[in-house]
Image (cartoon, helix red, strand yellow):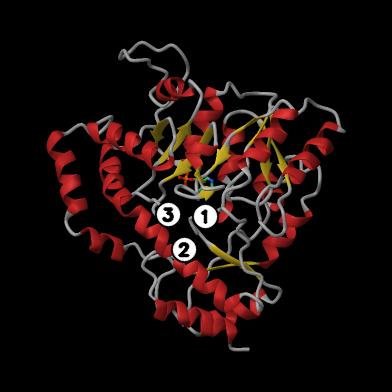
């Protein structure tokens, strides 16, 4: 049976904004500064204020945000970087694109995130063998729940590693009451349409704090030019956020607080009805997820999927395989064997969650899961 409603539905948000998006796009069409227009600067300031980042450098995608940052950090051939085994491929892909070598670290079975022990185990296992020690690590705020930034940054620093957090799913999340731009020296995010803050195309940003990386990032995203046109001081690339996307994001940003509250309410409601029957997401105290995904862990996934399909309930799997099990990444090193990531890939099931999901539709999800 086809789904009776969408897994992610962007239409109600557009309706709520009325003509504001169309008007914002119209203003860009009128002024004609399609690249580096005034909306981009304004957006960078407003994003920084929202997540308490000192500097925000927007770019063409969340993947590019990672690649630009790795370039700015001087990462290249011969460098090894720890990335989670259980994440969207872009985290590891960016390392390869930057010319370096991703080394996988396992995640925690409960949080699905990298914890200090996972970082230390992977570091120890890979330095047991030949080759240089990793120079950095990229934990991921999976499903929108922030990692323990402080503990991971200190654990990494003890080994001489820098930390960059892939916050593609967690823009607006809190850990110990602090937003991601306040917690990290460097974090990246994505504005892919289905992310908690999405544009109408591709977009991304680097969030910087206590660092002078922002000027370098601005240069790299614009062909290695500094402020003067046609003076190239370094190798860069072309990765700017379109002014139209910035104008769209400015309108959407005004709804984000209310939307995050709605996601949180829906997540609580899922947990109230599903905890006990299924392994529901574990969010540490003082932490607020963006609920980019509401992902439960189940043993009889195929049966449940059949049941959801019969009821017309949409679902998704994030992610079907751990990265070391993916053909594209099978030759990269996974020194601990990542047993947790492999187990999670077989057990995770994401349920529909977005700010405009109705309680009626949510009840349908809950009922079809619980009809035993
Ligand atoms: C979506 C996502 C990205 C990539 O973002 P794009 O904007 O699609 O390039 C990177 N990492 C994670 C964890 C993501 O979920």
Marks 3 and 1, how far apart at CA:
13 Å
Q: Earlier in the sequence, mark 3 or mark 2?
A: 3
Q: Is mark 2 within 8 Å of ligand 1?
A: no
Q: Is mark 1 within 8 Å of ligand 1?
A: no
Residues under numbered marks 2 and 1 in contact, where contact means CB atoms less than 8 Å apart: yes
Visible residue check, residue 362? yes
Residue 254 image point, x, y percent:
29, 50
Residue 264: which disc? 2
Q: Is residue 245 above or below residue 70?
A: below
Is label 2 in a helix, a strand or a loop? helix
Drawn side of residue 238 relative to residue 180, left or right: left
Marks 2 and 1, how far apart at CA:
8 Å
Q: Nearer the viewer, residue 130 or 360?
A: 360
Q: Which residue is mark 3?
A: 196
Q: Nearer the viewer, residue 161 or 130?
A: 161
Is label 3 in a helix, a strand or a loop? loop
User: In the rendered view of the protein, which quadrant contains the C terminus?
Assistant: bottom right
Is label 1 in a helix, a strand or a loop? loop
- Of tags 3 and 1, the one toward the viewer is 1
Q: Which residue is mark 1?
A: 288
Residue 327: which disc? none
x 64%, y 80%: residue: 303
x 54%, y 25%: residue: 71
Residue 39 image point, x, y percent:
25, 36
Q: Earlier in the sequence, mark 2 or mark 1?
A: 2
């Amino acid at each position: 049976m086809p789904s009776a409603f969408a897994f992610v539905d962007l239409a109600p948000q557009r309706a709520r904004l009325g003509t504001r998006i169309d008007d914002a796009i119209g203003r860009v069409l009128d002024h004609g500064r399609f690249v580096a227009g005034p909306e981009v600067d304004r957006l960078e300031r407003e994003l920084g204020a929202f997540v308490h980042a000192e500097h925000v450098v927007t770019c063409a995608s969340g993947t590019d945000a990672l690649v630009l940052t790795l370039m700015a950090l001087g990462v290249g051939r011969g460098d090894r970087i720890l990335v989670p085994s259980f994440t969207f491929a872009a985290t590891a892909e960016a390392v390869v694109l930057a010319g370096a070598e991703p080394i996988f670290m396992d995640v925690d079975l409960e949080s699905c995130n990298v914890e200090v022990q996972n970082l230390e185990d992977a570091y120890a296992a890979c330095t047991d063998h030949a080759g240089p020690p990793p120079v950095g690590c990229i934990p991921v705020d999976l499903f929108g729940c922030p990692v323990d930034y402080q503990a991971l940054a200190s654990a990494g620093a003890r080994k001489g590693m820098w930390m960059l957090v892939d916050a593609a799913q967690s823009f607006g999340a809190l850990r110990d009451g602090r937003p991601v731009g306040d917690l990290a020296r460097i974090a990246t995010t994505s504005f892919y349409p289905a992310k908690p803050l999405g544009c109408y195309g591709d977009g991304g940003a680097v969030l910087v704090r206590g660092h002078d990386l922002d000027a370098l990032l601005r240069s790299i995203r614009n062909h290695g030019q500094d402020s003067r046109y046609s003076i190239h001081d370094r190798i860069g690339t072309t990765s700017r956020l379109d002014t139209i996307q910035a104008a769209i994001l400015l309108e959407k940003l005004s709804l984000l607080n209310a939307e995050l509250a709605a996601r949180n309410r829906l997540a609580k409601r899922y947990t109230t009805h599903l905890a006990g029957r299924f392994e529901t997401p574990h969010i540490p105290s003082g932490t607020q997820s963006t609920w980019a995904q509401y992902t439960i862990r189940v043993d009889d996934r195929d049966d449940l999927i059949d049941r959801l399909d019969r009821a017309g309930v949409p679902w998704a799997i994030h992610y079907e395989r751990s990265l070391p099990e993916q053909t594209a990444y099978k030759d990269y090193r996974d020194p601990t064997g990542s047993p947790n990531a492999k187990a999670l890939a077989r057990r995770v099931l994401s349920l529909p969650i977005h700010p405009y999901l109705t309680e009626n539709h949510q009840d349908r999800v809950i009922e079809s899961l619980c009809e035993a």
